[in-house]
Amino acid sequence: MSIGLITFLIMFAIVFLCRIPIPYGILSIGVVYFVVTGGNVGIVANNVLNTYCTNYVIIAVPLFIFSANVMNTGKITGMLFRFADGLVGRYRGGIAYVNVIASLIFSGMTGSAIADASGLGVMEIEEMRKQGYDEGFSAAITACSATIGPIFPPSIPMLLYAAVTGTSVGALFMGGMLPGVLMAVVLCIYVTYISNKRKYPYGARYTLRSFLVYSLQAFPALLTPIILLGGIYGGVVTPTEAGALAGLYGLFASAVIYRALSWDDLKNIIIKTVGSTGIVALTIGCASVLSYISAREHIPQLLGGFVLNLTDNKYIFLFVATLIFLVLGMFFTSSTITLVFMPMLLPLVEHFHIDPVHFGVLFVVNMMIGMVTPPYGSLLFVTSAISGVKLGVLIKECLPMILMMLVFLYILAYCPVIITFLPAHFMN
């Protein structure tokens, strides 16, 4: 084992145990590594500029971040909530179903779990409280339903995965459609069970006239995923251009149709978008440092050799890989895991002849479950903050849903047709 690899492993352990913020931790690993080994920092900088800063797919990331911020600022989230309420709100536990269905619809606009939880989540939790739902369950179903956001297209994590692996963005987006819908079904099954067990109230019954009024009001918002996905699969726009189109249409709908966007709101949206984009850009740059170290020290080959010495069975590999990503998802953001760890596993994915679309969607589902898995799932902290529910109470309510989602995850792992069916039939 070389001195460089030993230095890398020791520094990685120190950064992880000390819980240093990811970008600064990775930079510190790089600094110490280059001091010890005398590596060329200029090569890393050149790699970042040539590989990522000129990558057309990555440009879509800030565009979809901007789109998500626009959706959360205008009346669009409110319109979606009322439409979903009219659609499924009349059943026992109706507002909990609304929570899930609204997240599924919202996911077709933003591709961000955090945007879902922090935007729709505030409205959903407040309404559930008014109707007498347990606070812990209200926050838990909000956190778990937010995981649908990056699974159903568009998806920011899928864009990063495509940038790293060269997989078709269109195929990944289409591959996420069925899993996104089925994840909503899984959560609705649990809502049915818990609502009957705890005797949660029936929701409001809307007249046909009222429902049609809400549908018409929500129609401009509901057009967003149709415009996005129709444009991509109709060959009119690329996924990157679709991100720009989503932001532009969101601005038009919020400012012109709903008249709910002021100049101050737009200023705040831009500031928030720039901040979020800066975090992603910093993470990409720092991850390139680790990618360089990984390639120089032949870590993918060492990892591949280690795994292949343990098993040459792709199903066991899928089991272990999903378990590893689940654990990583508890501690790191999906962007960090995609940019840092995915290049290390990619040779193994190719060795086992696993469809990159199947693995990519499976990976994103895995990351989303990790975001609600204790102890450090980021969605747990976001939802706890916006709801005021104690983390321990929230985790207790989340655990049954996490177990159901884990079962669903392994069904996806061993039944790839669920993911590959749509791309195989409509992308060729």
Image: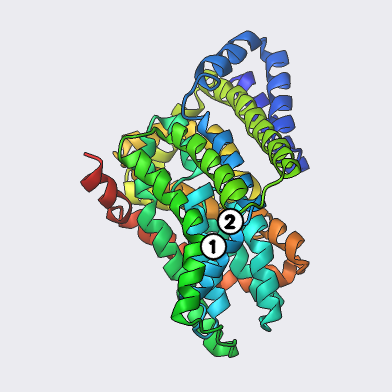
Q: Can residue 165 be seen by looking at this rendering?
A: yes
Identified by mark 2, the residue type is: Ile
Q: In terms of secondary structure, where does tag 1 sit?
A: helix
Helix, strand or loop status at disc 2: helix
Residue type at mark 1 is: Leu
Q: Looking at the picture, does residue 351 appear above or below residue 1?
A: below
* Quadrant location, the C terminus: top left
The label on residue 80 is 1
Instruction: State left or right for residue 336 relative to residue 172.
Output: right
402 left or right of 412? Answer: right
Is residue 323 among what the camera can see? Answer: no
In what quadrant of the picture does the N terminus appear?
A: top right
Residue at figure coordinates x 48%, y 45% from the top left: 155
Query: Contact, CB < 8 Å: mark 1 with mark 2?
Result: yes
Q: Disc 2 marks which residue?
A: 76
Quadrant of the rendered structure where residue 138 is?
bottom right
Give me the residue at 76% from left, 38% from top.
20
Closest to the observer, 422 or 409? 422
Q: Report the colour scheme.
A: rainbow
Q: Residues within 10 Å of mark 2 (few under 14, many from 20)?
A: many
In the visual, does 92 lie left or right of 234? Answer: right
Residue 49's disc number: none
Apparent side of residue 67 relative to residue 312 in the rendered image (left or right):
right
Q: Position of residue 314 (x, y in %)?
A: 33, 46
- Please state the total of marks drawn on the protein image: 2
- In this rendering, the answer to whether 281 lies above or below 324 is above
Residue 193 x, y percent position in the rendering? 50, 83
Image position, residue 422 (x, y; %) = 27, 50
For the residue pair 249 and 105, the one nearer the viewer reads as 249
Q: What residue do we see at 47% from left, 59% from top? A: 219
Q: Above or below — where is 352 with respect to 401?
A: above
